[in-house]
Amino acid sequence: MPLRARIMDAAFTGSRLMSTDTDIPRELPGDEPDDVLFNNIYGVRTIELNRPKKLNSLNGSMARKIVPRLKEWEKSQLANVIVIKGAGRAFCAGGDVAVLAQQNTEGPKGQKASSDYFALEYQLDHLIATYSKPYVAFMDGITMGGGVGLSVHAPFRIATEKTIFAMPETTIGFFPDVGGSFFLPRLDGEIGTYLALTSEQLKGANVFYNGIATHYLDSTSLPDLEARLAELNFRDSADYETRLAIIDATIAEFATGLPSAADSPRQLTGAIRTAIDTVFSPRTALTPQHLISALTQLASDTAIVAPEVREWAGKTRATILERSPTSVAVTLRLLREGARWSVARAFQHEHALATRFMATADFVEGVTARLVRKPAATPQWSPASLEDVNAATVSKFLAFGEENGVEPLRLLNSGPGADYQEYPHRWIGLPAERDVEARVQQRRSTAEEVVAEFVQERRGKQGVREKVEEILGRKTEVVDGVLVWRN
């Protein structure tokens, strides 16, 4: 595997779109002094998000502290591993959107301030996604929205029994940002589209099984793991890939088994997962209206559709119809296009899109109704239905560069590995469904042989057997004694 993927799409990552050291954000007067805590423990550098009463919601003050530290540590020969974690019961519950919604009510000046915040946040997220040193995210607790941006692009993403993952942006009149246009389409099947449009929460080991986390550990082991990582010494000759392999093996030392189905029921498997891949596929969900029609048909088909799938379809349909119609329509198109984008292009497009959303009524309405008003209320979306959001409107939201008047986002990392089409560290997590499909298609094998091959290749990694067996059970059949992939 290459140390870093080659630079992709120079039109979006040329020098004119890259920042210099003089562009690195610095703290401003009025920034909270202790909302992020930093520590050095031998070779480990730790970032602790420290707004527990706000569930560590990310704001500009925090980002302005984290970015300079990451740039500083990147140059330090003493910093071997970066660990990010959160204080209290959340890793990071998202961005501090209430502040942004209030700014937006102040007109163009306030909307510009909100757009500038997203520029800073996405610069930080892209820096993490392309960081030159090993970066480990403890996704212990609530990990949503902005917290996903701080973790999901990292080579090491550790879920625990306390992890609750979600991308809830369509509930507040926004879209799944922080690189969501890049990572969501690259999840197995149509899981990413489903999570983006419904905001469904994944809990505990399910965050690991579905490819969002690379490891699953008991939360009580995290302090010991952090101490063990601090003890690691890398040879000067060890390249980035070798260091990742050493850290991967170190994390595996702390794995004590996965929870039972009784303790942590599997999500998005079996017939429900098959329905997700069918209904949310580009062939079925050409538009949101097609998606709703497919869900309606599935929910009412008593002849061949299992009761649990009918119930799921009905609930999913109702959920999507509660979301901002504009957000649903834009998100569906965004994920289809994002599947072809590089990581840098994704963040640049998202900044232009976020700027557009800051000028709409739905974001202010969604945040105010759901998060500010007490008790929370049902947002009054404008437009109010999916039928009122046409293709031209969606295209206007997704316009880029000169087409929408927003200057392309300048990114902080312009060095080797600053852009790629696929995560260069994808091998660290569980096998993806496409990996299993390729193996089945390449050779005539039994299920036992395929499982054994993956377990051996991944050196007995926890969860490999369980995931491969689930995929084979759902996607293959035996013909003349060998596996055949069902399309």
Image (cartoon, rainbow, N blue to C red):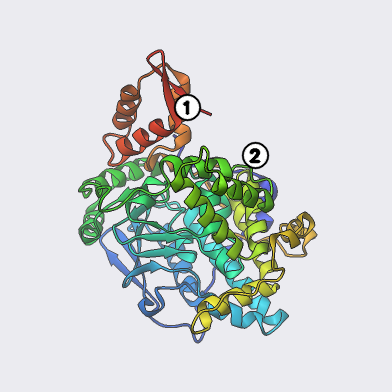
- The residue furthest front is 303
**What is the quadrant of residue 421 in the picture?**
top right
Label 2 sits on a secondary structure element that is loop
Crowd class of label 1 (few under 14; some 14 to 19; many from 20; radius 10 Å): few
**Measuring 38% from the left and 18% from the top, which residue is drawn there?**
445
Q: Nearer the viewer, residue 193 or 30?
A: 193
Label 1 sits on a secondary structure element that is helix
Q: Which residue is mark 2?
A: 283
Q: How many marks?
A: 2
Q: Nearer the viewer, residue 468 or 107?
A: 468
Image-based side of 332 in relation to 261, left or right: right
Image-based side of 436 in relation to 100, left or right: left
Front label number (2 vs 1)? 2
User: Mark 1 is on which residue type?
Assistant: Ala
- Residue 412 screen position, x and y as percent: 56, 60
User: Mark 2 is on which residue type?
Assistant: Arg
**Measuring 46% from the left and 60% from the top, which residue is drawn there?**
166
Determine if residue 21 is in view.
no
**Measuring 44% from the left and 40% from the top, which residue is drawn there?**
271
Crowd class of label 2 (few under 14; some 14 to 19; many from 20; radius 10 Å): few
**Measuring 45% from the left and 54% from the top, which residue is drawn there?**
152
Residue 233 vs 74, above or below: the answer is above
Q: What distance separates the C-alpha of mark 2 from that of mark 1?
A: 22 Å
Name the N-terminal-most of marks 2 and 1: 2
- Residue 328 screen position, x and y as percent: 63, 59
**What is the quadrant of residue 429 in the picture?**
top left
Q: Which residue is mark 1?
A: 438
Image quadrant for the N terminus?
A: top left
